[in-house]
Image: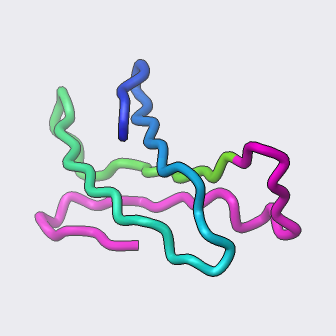
Amino acid sequence: MCALREQVVVCRTGALAADGVGERIDLRVRLREASTEVLLELDTLWGGGAVDGNRANDRQRVLVLDTGDSYYF
């Protein structure tokens, strides 16, 4: 489930199994103005008392170039 808040898309995945791979989230983004690149930031938010010992892997930043290709990560 995803929602748009200002210029941010927020998606909720729900609880993830400790050794699970999660679920796939597909987003198609259309911009108001033409751009040759977009910065995509992904964050992991922890809740319910869950703690990750490696907080360095909670955030990813990807430069998405306008190549017409699909991006997977």
Measured as percent of width and height from the top left, residue 9 is found at 40, 35
Q: In this view, does 51 lie to the left or right of 37?
A: right
The residue positioned 53% from the left and 49% from the top of the image is: 14
Measured as percent of width and height from the top left, residue 46 is found at 72, 48
The magenta segment is 46-73
Q: Is residue 52 above or below residue 32?
A: below
Q: In this view, does 63 lie to the left or right of 72?
A: right
For residue 48: magenta?
yes
Q: Name the quarter where the C terminus is drawn.
A: bottom left
Measured as percent of width and height from the top left, residue 29 is found at 22, 43
The residue positioned 51% from the left and 76% from the top of the image is: 21
Type of colouring: rainbow
Q: Name the quarter where the N terminus is drawn.
A: top left
The residue positioned 64% from the left and 80% from the top of the image is: 19
- Residues 41 and 23: in front is 23
Q: Is residue 39 left or right of residue 35?
A: right
Q: Quadrant of residue 59?
A: bottom right
For residue 59: magenta?
yes
Q: In this view, does 52 lie above or below 9?
A: below
Main SS category, magenta section: loop
| Residue sitting at the far bottom | 19
| Residue sitting at the far right | 53
Q: In this view, does 3 lie above or below 73?
A: above
Q: Quadrant of residue 6?
A: top left
- Residues 13 and 71: in front is 13
